[in-house]
Image (cartoon, rainbow, N blue to C red):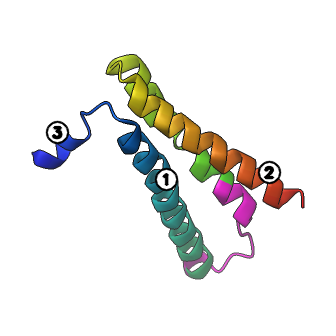
Amino acid sequence: MKIILMFKKDTYLLGVLMGIFLPVMFYGFLFLINLLILNIFDLNFIIKQSTLQLISIFINLFPVRYYFVNLKYEKTGRGILFITFVYLVFYFLVLYN
């Protein structure tokens, strides 16, 4: 119950922390599923790391919309959005360098 109440705050820190940890956890989840599919079905098709990273960054759009539209918590939404832009800039700098 206390954990749920923690996510009902309008702070930049909560948004930044959510923006950092959600893509990292989702990337780990996708990476493990990719490995399981590769090992179980013995396929040669592997989703590229760059695709997994981009999909993981995309997951931040759902909490951004939830905090901006449903809860009207602008500080938390801006924190998530800021970290999403940082991830995207870093992604494209690494991809094209």
Q: Earlier in the sequence, mark 1 or mark 3?
A: 3
The residue type indicated by label 3 comes to: Leu
Whether the magenta-drawn stretch holds residue 42 is answered as yes
* Disc 3 target residue: 5
Q: Is residue 69 left or right of residue 46?
A: left
Which corner quadrant holds the N terminus?
top left
Task: Find numbered disc 1 in the image and state the secondary structure of the residue it sits on.
Answer: helix
Position above or below: 71 against 28: above
Residue 7 location (% of width, % of height): 26, 40
Q: Amino acid at mark 2?
A: Phe
Residue 13: x %, y % from top left: 38, 44
Residue at point 46%, 26% (across, down): 65
Determine the CA span between mark 1 and mark 3: 20 Å
Q: Quadrant of residue 41?
A: bottom right
Q: Which circle's residue, 2 or 1, is located before the other in the chain? A: 1
The answer to whether residue 66 of the structure is visible from this angle is no
Mark 1 lies on residue: 20
Outermost residue on the left side: it is 1
| Magenta-colored span | 40-53
> Which residue, given by chain and number where applicable, does mark 2 sit on?
92
How far is mark 3 from mark 2, CA to CA?
Answer: 36 Å
Is residue 45 or residue 51 the one in the foreground?
Answer: 51
* 34 lies left or right of 75: right
